[in-house]
Amino acid sequence: MFAHLLSVMIFLPIVAGLILLFAPLSRTTARIVGFGVSLAVLVLSIDVYAGFSATGKLEFVEYIPWIPSLGIAYHLGIDGISLFILMASAVLLPMVYVLFGTREKGYYANLLLVEGAMIGAVCAADLVLFYVFWEVMLLPVFFMLGLYGGPRKIHATLKITLYTIAGSLLMLAALAYLAVQYHALTGEWSFSIEKMGLLDLSGHAAALALFGFMIAFAIKIPLFPFHTWLPDAYTEAPTATTFVLSAIMAKIGVYGVIRVVMPAFEMEFARYALFFAYAGVIGMMYCGLTAIAQKDYKRLLAFSSASHMGIIAVGVFSMNVQALTGTIYQIVAHATSTGVLFLFAGILEERTRTRTINDLGGIASQAPIFALFFAIAMLASVGLPGTSGFIGEFLIILGALKFNVAVGVLTGLSLIIGVCYMLWLFQRVFFEKTKTASERFKDLSPVESLAFVPVILLILVMGIYPHPFLRKIEPSTAQYFAAATPIVAQATTATPALAADLTTEKN
Amino acid sequence: MTNDFMLLFPVILVSLGAIGLMLAATCRCVQIEQAAWACGGLFGFAFLVQLAATLTGDQALYSSLFNDILVVSPFSKAASLVILGCGLFTVCSSLSYFKKNNFSSTEYYSLLLFAASGMLLLTMTRELISTFIALEIMSLAIYILVGYDRDNVLSTEAVMKYLILGAFAGAFLTMGSAFVYGAAGSTKFALIGNFVATTGFLSNPAILAGSFFILVALLFKAAAFPFHAWVLDVYDGASMPITGFMATALKTAIFAVFANFLLADSGLQQGWVTFLFYIAILSMFMGNFIAIGQSSLKRMLAASGIVHSGYLLIGLVALGSQPVPGSVVAFYLAAYAAGTLGIFSALSYLSGKGEQWKNFDDFKGLAKTKPYTAFAISIFLLSMAGIPPTAGFMGKLYIILAAIQAGQITLAVLGIVSSIVAMWYYLRLIVTMYFHAPERSFAEECPSRIGTVSTLVLVLCVFAISLYPIAL
């Protein structure tokens, strides 16, 4: 439609958010403006989606030199991998404005800022630009959590902030290393993410840089053992923040692994893939088991989200086209199911004023629509056939089995844990006897129901007819394995190297 | 003649202004405010002149003056730009500071100009004697400025400490110069460099000892480990604007002469790389650990200045790998100066009479009562912490790039680790300002307009330096 679509999508929310922060407006105006802007972004994103032709290369490219002497540029573009994360954030954010009306002005403004920054991080095709948006993304979360969070908000805020900043600073060193290596190889300075694919790094320094990136992304995802900030932050944060963190921001961590780490560190990545995959499996099991024991439903959902992110991570580290495609698919599925469950939890908390599972019960008879929607999202999150979660998880397990039988089997097994805590949660909250807290639970209003309908539809459509979505994803994921030296081919040669490495570490 | 005049114009302007103001101070008819405006105007004008000279490139035929004693390079131009900018904003924050405190006089502004002229000379000098003279012009003015509040015990303590230790540093510099002269037979950096290149660095004990003494003096002035102990008390005792001036302009001048000295010959720099390597690491971590424990904001900023000296030393270690020598250091200095000056500019009008509010706890809930100021301070802190898209981030990125490019991966990684630690105390103030309930109204501080305007301009600077990195 017009030339700078991606830039508009990034800076429209950021500018609007800044204006909201500084202009003396009422909270209703702020809410309306926020809703309007996020809707506008949604419309633009649909335009992008329609215009996206799935060539496997970057599309909608914008390129403006920024610091020519170092080859840093304002370089944007999207492919099949970033498109879906972009769509997820554009589709999901307007819902927040509809559902939560009693918040302060700064809350709505920060949501816009975080939306712009997330879209920016996903669209960036330059490492420095990516890093800038990656860090900017954290600031609104910091303020939302610290200003509008629960009783232990300061503790949670400092924990998430220090954790993530520590990770991203390590990434800064790693990306500087990449750029210097690229300079050494070609004699020109560049921070273009695409060009980093030309590098084939190995050796100790490369492994260090790989871990620099991986720690940053693992903290954001969060991957075991870097998940300890998550329960505090997810539980103390206001609903919209938890939603943003779980539905989109966690995915940008995965996206970073796919976009930056896999192409640049082919050999080293293959060497450590099994190690990371096991980290994913352990996280999945561990968080799943912890979720069963939770008494607070928001905390339970927090662990469930982390557990499902483990599956997505396994998909990335399995290094084949099925698993990678499944990962992208599952990213959207997770955002629309587990992410949306946090919105339901927010509504539940607002209306019953409690987060303890045992205080609730019998909501299904009070609020059938709420229960129905919750059930659909929940079933999608556990991967019931016919919902979006099934397709993604199926592809990931298929790919994981192909990569390593043990990883595949364990991934499959851990899904059962997911079913356990989810169904048990549903039973305790929605069935059983009505308790005092849930006695007067009001069902969703028509407007609220309407806000959820698109997501519920999306879950079902993606579950029943995945082809149109897969068609957009596959060219880009296939690109990863069709290059001159495909990553998969090295996996077989590199796996023994891992085993050797592990034994030396034990000595 | 015209050529020399063009190159020296900012220095001439500033030093003539200093003398003029000092003379004018004897006359009763000159108001303090007028002196301040004159001083600020001079800084501003000199800044613009220098900016024009920097942007238009090399108009001058020769870049050296007085038989190569002073040399104007892109690096010295950038450093003097930073110094002049610092001077301008220091005048602005002094104006708002002295609305509450009344120990200012016309000479105060004259001394600022004197200090600045010494600093400007330091950026250009390529010779040891003139280094000493410039350093002393600057230091003498700074000593007086530190102890300007004569009724304040802390201020007196600060000036005593600084004067005695600073005198030692000056003595070290002279002794080092004498040694080096004794060995190399010249005090010019270029000739010393030639001498080192022909005879080797380690083979000559006089050169070794001499350059060691010179480094000690410079490290002392730059507040690097292990010569950092004076910083906390001196910064704490000096008045807010002067602390800001010392933290930024003085550091810029010292690092400029430091870089020029090391650039004289790669052998000299190589000889000291290992030494500077450890100094850089220890400065960063020592500074961090000191900063974490502070409850006074001013002392925290002083300690964080030690950390930033550490980063700048990384830049010096990696001097060889920079496209234009010193450009990374100059950029980092500019970025750091914008952030630090900004925070001192805001504190100048927030701290109240006699600086009664300068602890972390005094700023609880500032965001509720003064949202714009709190926002500005947050931006400055984020810049000092190196969070994009602020200038501090770009500075850090260049430093890290240069370090890795020079093969100093350990140094780069330790720099990163240190900035992770540093996040804690920068975030602490933001948390205090935003997430705690206000304990006092801050209403009594009705800031003068100049204070808020200069703070705002500095916020813009922080972003502008990052988005348009002209120094490179």
Image (cartoon, coloured by chain):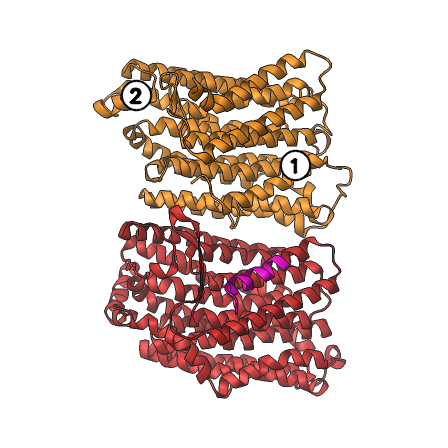
Chain colours: A red, B orange
The answer, for residue A226, to whether it is visible in the render is no
Chain of the residue under label 1: B
> What residue range appears in magenta?
A1-16
Instruction: Estimate the x, y position of residue B370 in percent, counting from the top left.
Output: 71, 45
Which residue position holds label 2? B192
Which residue position holds label 1? B347
> Do the residues marked 1 and 2 share a common chain?
yes
Chain of the residue under label 2: B
Prevailing SS of the magenta stretch: helix
Q: Is residue B162 above or below residue B96?
A: above
**Mark 1 surroundings: few (<14), some (14-19) or many (≥20) residues within 10 A:** many
Contact between labelled residues 2 and 1, with CB atoms less than 8 Å apart? no
* Amino acid tagged 2: Ile
* Amino acid tagged 1: Leu
Instruction: Estimate the x, y position of residue A212 in percent, counting from the top left.
Output: 39, 56
Q: Is residue B132 above or below residue A507?
A: above
Mark nearer the N terminus (1 vs 2): 2
Instruction: Estimate the x, y position of residue B431 in percent, counting from the top left.
Output: 63, 50
Q: Is residue A262 above or below residue B91?
A: below
Q: Residue at x 66, y 29 (%)?
A: B94
Residue nearest the viewer, comparing A424 with B233: B233
Left or right, A225 with respect to B207, comes to: right
Q: Is residue A462 magenta?
A: no
Q: Residue at x 67, y 14 (%)?
A: B25
Q: Nearer the viewer, mark 1 or mark 2?
A: 2
Secondary structure of the residue carrying tag 1 is helix
Image quadrant where one finds the N terminus of chain B: top left
